[in-house]
Amino acid sequence: SCATRPLFGRFPSPTTDRRPRDARGMSSTTVVDLTVYPVKSCAGISVAKAALTETGLRFDRSWMVVEAREARSSKAGRRKRSKKPKPSVFVSQRVDPCLARVEPWLPREVLDPSLWDGIAPPPENACLVLRHAPAPGSADAIDRGTTNESDLGELRVPLDVKKPLKRRLVQVWDWVGEAGDEGEEA
């Protein structure tokens, strides 16, 4: 009956978990694939290794696409107040499935933790590159006949920011906070 079935999966109990154990009684786990998603809701980059920071993997969901919102106006009949900024809301694949075809690229020199420590400035001219791949079978893909970088539009976002980015109020689900605005081109 439905009443006796759990609604959610459970972690295996120590008595039913039959994975091999080390001398301390810990089960071993092997990572077989590691993917970093530089832009929230876009395609990922498969990596052999990644640096772990206090917020997760370096460059994982470091950028996001947002939909700008207009400032709220004060209510009529009340004292005039300054307009409160309304947060820009992140756009997910649920809202725009085309984001799945946005392919990010980062240079190996910044992805590989043995080549860049993340503290020193990134290599000169290092950029996050975003390309929008045409949908398979679309007229655009058939017309192009290829998906090399010369025939796809691309956006380059410098990693070495020369001046502080303009701050923008953003919202991701229930969280509201500030983020750096990469500018109109982005």
Image (spheres, rainbow, N blue to C red):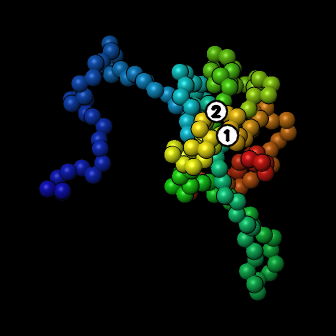
Q: Vertical placement of 78 versus 125: above or below? A: below
Q: Is 145 situated left or right of 10 in this image?
A: right
The label shown at residue 134 is none
Q: Vertical placement of 59 versus 73: above or below? A: above
- Name which residue lies at 38% across and 23% down: 29
Residue nearest the observer in this picture, 15 or 20: 20
Q: Percent from the top left, x then y, of residue 38?
A: 61, 37
Q: Is 177 situated left or right of 124 in this image?
A: left
Q: Is 25 situated left or right of 40 in this image?
A: left
Q: Residue 18 occupies which quadrant of the picture?
A: top left
Q: Pointers 1 and 2 in contact (CB under 8 A)?
A: yes
Report the residue marked by disc 1.
152
* Three-letter amino acid code of the residue under disc 2: Asn
Q: Give the CA separation, mark 1 to mark 2.
A: 7 Å
Tell me the crowding category of disc 1: few under 14, some 14 to 19, or many 20 or more residues within 10 angstroms, Cα based: some
Q: Vertical placement of 114 versus 37: above or below? A: above
Q: Residue furthest right?
A: 163
Q: Percent from the top left, x then y, of residue 178?
A: 71, 50
Q: Residue 95 occupies which quadrant of the picture?
A: bottom right
Report the residue marked by disc 2.
148
Q: Residue 121 occupies which quadrant of the picture?
A: top right
Tell me the crowding category of disc 2: few under 14, some 14 to 19, or many 20 or more residues within 10 angstroms, Cα based: few
- Name which residue lies at 29% across and 44% down: 9
The answer to whether one can see residue 128 in this image is no
- Name which residue lies at 80% across and 44% down: 165
